[in-house]
Amino acid sequence: MKIVIIGGGIIGLSSAYYLQQSGHTITVIDKTDMRNNCSYGNAGYVCPSHFVPLATPGIVKQGLKWMFNATSPFYVKPRLDINLINWGLKFMKSATPEKVEAAAIPLRDIALLSKHLYEEWVKQPQFAFAYEQKGLLEIFQTENNRKHAKHTIAKAHTLGLKDTVLLNYNELQALEPQTKINGLGAIHFKCDAHLYPNKLMQQLIAHLKNVGVTIINNEEVINFGTNTKNITSVITNQNKYVADAVVIATGSWSRELAAKLNIKIPLMPGRGYSVTVEEEKYKLNYPAVLLEGRAAVTPMDGNKTRFGGTMEITPTNTPPKLNRVHGLLNAVKRFYPEFDVPFPTEDKIWYGYRPCSADGLPYIGKTNKWNNVTIATGHSMLGLSLGAGTGKLVEEIVNEKIASINMQPYTVERFGS
């Protein structure tokens, strides 16, 4: 079949990888040059530990407190927007203990699948993207979060993530002897890995081109040719591409594109920021989530350290709020007091938009409206972590195979059509 994949992030490219392997003719279309999307600037985590979705009771309450703080870790830009209101109401309804509990298994399943597939990729000579399994530290500074950590570890164990342990301060500091840590302790999720996203994306694009996948940059999809319940072509601002099947993997722009096909996806863009430095004085051994600071720190590719975080629910055309980077670097300083990371020039600050579903689970699958359209979006902050696994699931959906995991939790129209 001729398959057109719309979106050149990790989800679209992973889908292309597996669909090409299964014998299809693949065209990937992206409206950018594919050099700096959200798949590049993230923390690089491959993290089965992230089995708690974004939509939790605590984040709703905290988000209201942070709403008018320009440097806060979680921020919703106040505005009269029917899509934001619709998403927000569904988000709040999803933020219950029962639904958080129900999300844990599907988040674990797709993360473990994806991790296994990345481990298969790195065995191949065309891939060398600094993949390491050292685990992930979740460092906490308060007694309340120490108590909560015990519950998190117990939950991880029930999910089969048995190599999750609680570290006291001395055990935590021993892992990073070259720098002081301000923290009471940490959870060590030994199941987690990390990689250098820039190398992964560059190598994946090079591989796809080498095996005959057509990659179209700087063309925006504006419409579709249809016939009853099938898409027959994808129309861009420059060309028309005949298609036997279509995959929509356009991240934070998926809601608008899917609407052209009368598909409703509750989804909002969540902007995040990161700064990457190459100075030895910021060297760390382990990637870490700074719990109270809601920031991430990752040693990458031997000589790099990436500081990332914040979640800013805002339109994709909103100018960046660089003050948020001050909040990010201040959070790092509170946990690593010897890290005096200077505020970078604007060209050194990366920002991108994560596609946030209304319940923290991705949307993966077909819809009732079209026979030959597969949706793969809504991965929030887990796009890279779940990328390889999502690509494999898309291949199984398109080829009508039995899926590797239970697909029901990711149903595209679970909020109604």
Image (cartoon, rainbow, N blue to C red):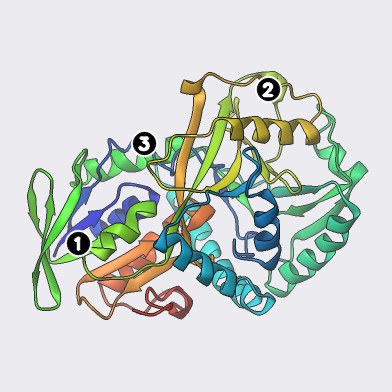
Residue 363, picture quadrant = bottom left
Residue 298, picture quadrant = top right
Tell me how far mark 1 sits from mark 2, CA to CA.
48 Å
Tell me how far mark 3 sits from mark 2, CA to CA.
27 Å
Q: Which residue is mark 2?
A: 341
User: In this view of the protein, which residue sits in the foreground, 291 or 40?
Assistant: 291
Q: Which residue is mark 3?
A: 202
Residue 238 locus on image (x, y percent): 9, 43
Residue at image position (65%, 62%) is 60
Image height check: is 308 above or below 377?
above
User: In this view of the protein, which residue sits in the foreground, 37 or 179?
Assistant: 37
Q: Nearer the viewer, mark 1 or mark 2?
A: 2
| Circle 1 Cα neighbour tier, 10 Å, few/some/many (<14 / 14–19 / ≥20) | few
Quadrant of the frame with the N terminus = bottom left
Tell how many labels.
3
Q: Give the residue type that dot 2 points to.
A: Val
Tell me how far mark 1 sits from mark 3, CA to CA.
23 Å
Q: Give the residue type that dot 3 points to.
A: Gln
Residue 104, picture quadrant = bottom right
- Position of 201 with respect to 328 (left or right) is left
Q: Which residue is mark 1?
A: 23
| Circle 2 Cα neighbour tier, 10 Å, few/some/many (<14 / 14–19 / ≥20) | some
Q: Earlier in the sequence, mark 3 or mark 2?
A: 3
Residue 135 locus on image (x, y percent): 68, 49
Q: Earlier in the sequence, mark 1 or mark 2?
A: 1
Q: Give the residue type that dot 1 points to.
A: Gly
**Visible in this render: residue 229?**
yes
Q: Nearer the viewer, mark 1 or mark 3?
A: 3
Q: Is there a contact, CB below 8 Å, between mark 3 and mark 2?
A: no
- Position of 80 with respect to 69 (left or right) is left
Residue 154 locus on image (x, y percent): 79, 70
Residue at image position (64%, 53%) is 192
